[in-house]
């Protein structure tokens, strides 16, 4: 009786290897880019405009339903989505064994994800603290100011820094030439930029994003270098398209937002004007997507001529 043949195991010592197609990557990216827009839809459209204000602003044990949903539903699924993306990027996949260097890169990505979720946890804990003090009539003083700073400044810096650093890490170190779903990469990248822009405005921290958003563009430059500085080639890459769309759309959205609304007005404070943010997102995304398609066609035409 012949012995069964064991599958050949491939040792992955670098990420400078071809990437395989992954449909699940697309779905997890879509969740990351779409999920936070629930605030605009549920709290803005249904809450402020259609009058179902209880959806986001019912107080349960001193905390709004919006914050409970964010911590119990949105954040855990977001953690899992980013975790799955890390697995897809670094592996191991079937019949693969990761080398020390790739394991190290993956561990750093996991650390960044943990710190991002940690920042969300700080924000939620201090939100409870601030709500409890507000109900007791304590809205000033050294302790209140310190807790408010931890909630609105420190936790946001942790969240935004590690989120942008994590995505930059994925853009740089994903395997090469992941060429499927190119238009989805652009579309989700634009939504990602708009999602982060609206998120930092709602979090009263728009200037943090302007500074940290540069990390995404630097990551795109490094990914271009890893593709032999061949722009037509790297333009076909999923994470480059997504990252470039993300990195450019966010500062553009922040610039246009403060022009349209005469400053960084938080969407949650707009009342019946909140629906205009949905229109703003749709217009900026549509124009950006049209420009990306135009660039795509120009590069294809150029490659055909050559």
Image (cartoon, rainbow, N blue to C red):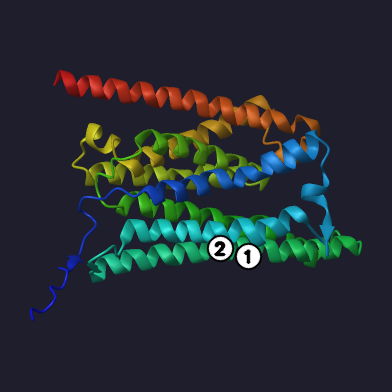
Residue 67 vs residue 160, the one in the foreground: 67
Quarter-wise, where is residue 272 in the image? top right
Can you give x and y, in whole percent of width and height, for residue 16 in the image?
A: 21, 53
Q: CA distance from mark 2 to mark 1?
A: 6 Å
Residue position for label 2:
117
In the current view of this chain or complex, which residue is farthest to the front? 1
Compared with 65, 258 (above or below) is above
Of the 4 image quadrants, the one containing the N terminus is: bottom left
**Residue neighbourhood size for the residue with mark 2, other residues' Cα within 10 Å, grouped as few (<14), some (14–19), many (≥20):** many
Residue 276 vs residue 253, the one in the foreground: 276
Q: Are marks 2 and 1 in contact (CB under 8 Å)?
A: yes
Q: Is residue 14 visible?
A: yes
Can you give x and y, in whole percent of width and height, for residue 207 in the image?
A: 58, 43
Give the numbered dot on residue 189. none
Residue drawn 23% across and 69% down? 99
**Residue neighbourhood size for the residue with mark 1, other residues' Cα within 10 Å, grouped as few (<14), some (14–19), many (≥20):** some
Q: How many numbered marks have been drawn onto this rendered protein structure?
A: 2
Q: Secondary structure at mark 2?
A: helix
Q: Secondary structure at mark 1?
A: helix
Residue position for label 1:
121
Left or right for 246, reference 174: right
Q: Is residue 258 visible?
A: no
In the current view of this chain or complex, which residue is farthest to the left? 2
Quarter-wise, where is residue 300 in the image? top left
Residue drawn 63% across and 26% down? 259
């Amino acid at each position: 009786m012949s012995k069964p043949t064991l599958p050949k195991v491939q040792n992955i010592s670098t990420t400078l290897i071809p990437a395989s197609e992954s449909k699940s990557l697309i779905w997890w990216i879509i969740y990351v880019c779409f999920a936070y827009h629930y605030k605009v839809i549920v709290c803005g459209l249904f809450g402020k405009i259609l009058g179902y204000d209880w959806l986001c602003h019912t107080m349960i044990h001193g905390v709004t339903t919006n914050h409970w949903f964010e911590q119990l539903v949105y954040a855990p699924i977001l953690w899992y989505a980013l975790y799955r993306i890390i697995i897809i990027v670094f592996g191991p996949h079937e019949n693969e064994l990761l080398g020390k260097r790739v394991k190290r890169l993956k561990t750093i990505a996991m650390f960044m994800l943990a710190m991002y979720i940690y920042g969300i946890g700080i924000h939620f804990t201090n939100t409870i603290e601030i709500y409890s003090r507000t109900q007791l009539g304590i809205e000033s003083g050294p302790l209140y100011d310190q807790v408010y700073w931890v909630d609105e400044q420190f936790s946001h810096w942790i969240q935004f820094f590690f989120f942008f650093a994590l995505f930059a890490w994925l853009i740089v170190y994903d395997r090469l030439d992941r060429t499927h779903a190119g238009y989805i990469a652009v579309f989700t990248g634009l939504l990602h930029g708009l999602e982060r822009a609206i998120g930092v405005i709602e979090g009263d921290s728009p200037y943090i994003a302007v500074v940290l958003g540069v990390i995404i563009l630097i990551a795109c430059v490094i990914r271009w270098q890893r593709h032999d500085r061949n722009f037509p080639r790297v333009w076909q890459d999923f994470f480059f398209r997504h990252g470039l769309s993300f990195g450019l759309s966010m500062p553009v959205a922040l610039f246009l937002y403060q022009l349209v609304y005469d400053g960084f007005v938080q969407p949650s404070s707009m009342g019946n004007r909140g629906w205009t943010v949905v229109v703003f997102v749709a217009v900026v995304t549509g124009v950006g997507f049209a420009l990306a398609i135009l660039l795509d066609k120009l590069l294809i035409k150029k490659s055909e001529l050559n």
